[in-house]
Structures are given as C-alpha cells and as structure tokens.
Image (cartoon, rainbow, N blue to C red):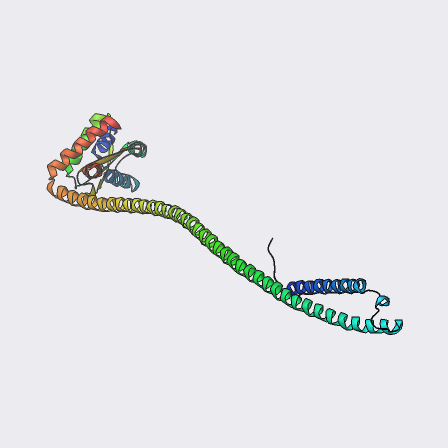
Amino acid sequence: MEIKTERLIEKIRTKEELVFLLGEIAEKKLVLEEEEIYELEKKLRSLPEIKLEIAFYPSDDFISKISWWLEKELGQKTILDITVNLKIVAGAIIEYKGNWRDFSIAKKINQLLAGS
Amino acid sequence: MTFNPTEQNIFLIIFFILAVIIVVVFIDTIKLFKKEKKVTPPLKSTPSRPYSTNELISKVSEDFKKQLEESVNKEIEKNIRELKSNFQETSEEIIKNYRNQFENGNQEVKKVISEISRQAAEETKKTSEILLEEFSQKFGEIYHLTRSALNKKTIEAGQEIENYKKEEFKKIDRKIYQILGEVAKKTIGKAVDLSDHEKLVMEALEKAKKEIF
C-alpha cells in the first residue's frame, strides 16, 4: 500500500498536478484506505514548493527534467509552481522558501541600459 | 564804519551849521556894538558949535545911531553874504562829500556785489563739483551693485537652465533607454529559441542553487 502512495507522490511535479491529486483525494476517487489517504494528503501538503517564472511554455519533458534536477539537488521531492511571463525575455525568476532571485534576461538588459 | 546819508542826517547837519552861523553873527554884532561905544569920544570937548550938552548928545547920538545902523547893516549884509557864501560852500562841500561818499558807496556796493557774485559763483561751482562728485560716487556704487546683482541673477538663471536641461535630458535618456529596452527585449525574446530558453532556465537554477537552495 505504501508503494502505491510513494508512486503517486513521485508522479507529482507541478502545483497543478498536486491540486488535481488533492482534488481526487477529496472526491474520494482514489482506491485507498482511509489511513493511507490521510498519510498521502499529509505528505503532499508537506512537500516544499519552488516558484519559477519563465518566458516560454515548458514542454512536459522539460518539466520532468527540472523536477528530477531539483530532487537530486535538494534531496527531496519539490513541487514546481510555474508561471509564464514573456516580459522577462528569457531565463527565470526563482523563489524558494521566502528567498527570491531574478535571473532573467530582462533584468540584464535593464542593468545594461541603466549603466550606459 | 560806514556813513549812512539819510535825509534826516543832512537836515540835522544843515540846521546845526545855520545855528552856528547865527550864533557867530550875533556875537560879532555884540562885539561891534561894544567897540563903537568905546570909540565915540565925549561930546563935551567940541568947541566949534555952541550946542547945549543935551542937544549935542542928542545930535551925536543920532549920527552915531545912523552910523551904527549903517555899520551894522553893512556888517549884517557882509555876514549874510559870508554866511551865504559859507553856506553855499559848505553845502557844496557836503553835497560833494555826500556825492563822493555815494560814489564811494556805490563803488563799495558794486565791489561787494561783485565779491558776493564771485563768491556765490565760486560756492556754486564748488557745490556743483561736490554734488557731481557725490553723484558720480553714488552712481558708481549703484552701478556696481546693480551689475553684481544682475550678474548673480544671470548666474542663478544660467544654473537653473542648466539644471532644467540636465533633468530634461535625464528624462529623455530614461525614455530612450526604456524604448531601447523594450525593443531589445522584444527582439531578443523573439530571437531566443526553445532550447536556449531551457538552457537559460537551467543556468538560473544553477545560480539559485548557489545562492538560495
């Protein structure tokens, strides 16, 4: 039973997927014991979240790639909250556990123009 | 001390001279009368005519009286002539003196007026010079003050214009950079392909790992 729960958690990469799964749990669409559902929901809600603002619509593979990379680097499953904003031109704005960094190309352009 | 020849003074002088002359004539007459009295000899010793003493005295008295009258008249006429003459001379002299004095006075007055005019002209000239000098000085001061004030204002105005220009240029620069930025972002955004986007996101994550993970 625990293996089933673990597989479900592994499949979750983004916030949309998490919300979808929590919705399934809430609607009791999952065939799981009451205790298992409780444990699953508890684990899902305790997963850390990372916000990514990027300038393109990412492919499924790229989302998997990022998710895998984050899990490897952070040592735990992390939920991706991805927002698409074309104004940042390229790169990404990242927020993790209250820390925020702008690694966008728009920022670099602004800095270049401000410095000239 | 100047002599002021008014009509009253002239009258007083003439009156005084006339009074002196009258007194002199009166004294002369009295003297003459006394002299005649002494000169007349006593009628008693005349032996030619056998007049009575009273007749003789009476005759002598009449002759003497006539003689005396004539003599007095002559003397009076003489004195009057002399008096007239003296009076005329004195009057002429006085008039002459007065005329001279008038002339001298006129000369003096002319001199004084001339001196006053000269001094007044000199004073006016001096005052004009002083006023001109003061005016020049004041004008110079005002000119310098006005000039320095204007210079200050000009410098201030120039500074204000310069600041305004700088501000306006800054605004224009900001707008230009804004436009340039927008153009650059759009251009670069269109130029970047999907693989580059992914690569840039991965680079961002690498940086984030170092800074915030």
Q: Nearer the viewer, residue B185 or B32?
A: B32
Residue A114 pos. (x, y %): 22, 38
Image quadrant holding the C terminus of chain B, namely top left
Taking the image as shown, residue A106 lies to the left or right of residue B9, namely left
Picture quadrant where residue A88 is located: top left
Taking the image as shown, residue B32 lies to the left or right of residue B110, namely right
Residue B60 pos. (x, y %): 82, 71
Q: Nearer the viewer, residue B160 or B130?
A: B130
Residue B39 pos. (x, y %): 79, 63
Taking the image as shown, residue B131 lies to the left or right of residue A98, namely right
Picture quadrant where residue B167 is located: top left
Q: Which residue is rendered at x = 48% and y = 54% of the image?
A: B115
Outermost front residue: B48
Taking the image as shown, residue A67 lies to the left or right of residue B1, namely left
Q: Nearer the viewer, residue B163 or B66?
A: B66
Residue B213 appears in the rendering: no
- Up the image or down, B20 lies above or below A28; here it is below
Residue B75 pos. (x, y %): 71, 67
Residue B151 appears in the rendering: yes
